Image (tube, helix red, strand yellow):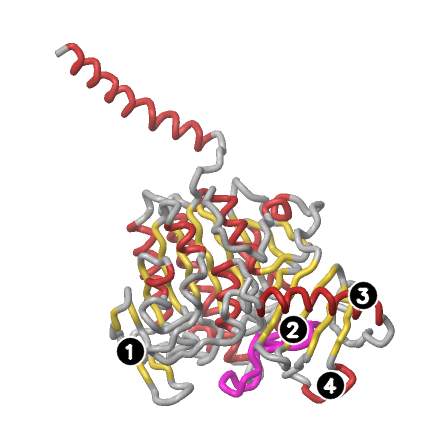
Amino acid sequence: MNDHKTLGRLILTACVVLPVILAQQKAAGQEPAKPNVIIIYVDDLGSIDANCYGSQDLETHNIDRLAKSGVRFLQMYAPSAICSSSRAGLMTGRIPARAGVPNNVSSQKGEAGMPTEEVTIAEMLKAHGYATGHVGKWHLGYTPETMSNGQGFGHSFGHMGGCIDNYSHFFYWQGPNRHDLWENGTEVFRDGQYFGPLMVDQCKQFIDKHRNEPFFLYWAINWPHYPLQATDKWRERYKHLTHPRDKYAAFVSSMDELIGQVLDHVEKRGLREETLIIFQSDHGHSVEERTFFGGGNPGIYRGCKGCLFEGGLRIPAIVSMPGKLPQNETRGQLVVGMDWFPTIAELTGAKLPARPLDGKSIISVIRSDDQPSPHESIYWQLGSGDNAQWVVRNGDWKLLGNPRDIREPKSLGPDDKLFLANIGSDPAEKQNLASQNPDVVQQLSEIKERYWREISGGK
């Protein structure tokens, strides 16, 4: 009997003392062992299309709010310049071509996408005790095993293909027209309901359901990707702008407003200081016919979506975790979207997969502007075969092979099959320096060949 009384007193003491200890640790500013993680991955946002990146004609109060509460990157590069490849690089921490996604995957139901042997951030964190949720765009496979629920997400709501109409939730851009809205592998119908608020509601529900355990939310907003279907509030706000900037701007601010609603909810639930929030565009702005041949703004940077010039790869990116990471600071070091995988692993204590990664943890860069880039060199490949676009970056030197400039296709000639730029002195990539620097071309070509052999060999 006395043993039972003693055990009861011990349990009672633990119930009283343990919460006090945890509260004291939180008050002392100690970093939680497993911070929540939210990745906000937007689509087709131009290189400078936020106020905090220099835009003078947009209103992006909530993107700017994240920047003030975190670190804004000045030289963040997308994993690729098209949608599926960029997402593969983010999700796996590997060069997209190495991860089996050198191009966009199909938006047709029944078509596979990223190989299932690839390990996603969701799979890594799920094994570490995290609840995992996906909201919005997937575009990495349209079979049960390659859809988001098959790639580590315990909950998923959104479209599996590249884009949808925001009211009917149909994919109209490659026939036949087909409905594409899914919840946990089951097709759901919300005809006439605007997709933006549907996404916000799903984000809030996921946060509320898992607020008492560590969670990972991947919110892939397919905005300002076409179709440019902004709210009336912002269409009225930008009616003074010329076409197509007016439509693009309205969609950017509609997107920014959604982000603010989710940020407000995280704060309302008292989770802000224990939640790592990453905001990033998947690549540069689109000049496709479906988006009226433009609307986005790359600033001085050459190229756009689909190009490996700076305008296709250099993108807005912010990381924020107030009280744990620096606030209202910028970083100029070269970093890439594949870096988030090992960075998240380090911050959460998750075990990295056995597969080799191309991304590097950038915790030291985030914490200090004096730390060097973790990348001595880095490689991009868009497409496959001999005509694939590719890039090697080594220091300030950047060598492009088979380059494309979709905005100004006539600006490249036969002598530009190899295009060498120095990003330090010529960030606009106006001049091809290849003929003047054959030794640099040779050095970077050798780096390219090494990556090419590794990827071709499946390593």
Mark 1 touching mark 2, by CB under 8 A?
no
Q: Position of residue 125 (x, y in %)?
A: 41, 50
Q: Earlier in the sequence, mark 2 or mark 3?
A: 2
**Residue 55 in sight here:** no
Residue type at mark 4? Ser
Inter-mark Cα distance, 3 to 1: 51 Å
Mark 4, Cα crowd under 10 Å, few <14 / some 14-19 / many 20+, is: few
Which residues, given as a range, are shown in magenta?
285-311
Q: Point out the frontmost of discs 4 and 2.
A: 2
> On the rendered structure, is 228 left or right of 305?
left
> Taken as a whole, is the magenta stretch helix, strand or loop?
loop
| Label 4 vs 3, first from the N-terminus | 4
Q: Is residue 318 left or right of residue 396?
A: left
Residue ID for mark 1 = 192
The numbered mark at residue 425 is 3
Query: Which amino acid type is marked by label 1?
Result: Gly
Q: Can I make out residue 160 in this image? A: yes
The disc at residue 411 is: 4
Labels 4 & 1 near each other (Cβ < 8 A): no
Most distant residue in the left direction:
1
Element marked by disc 2:
strand
Asked if disc 3 and disc 1 are in contact, CB closer than 8 Å, the reply is no
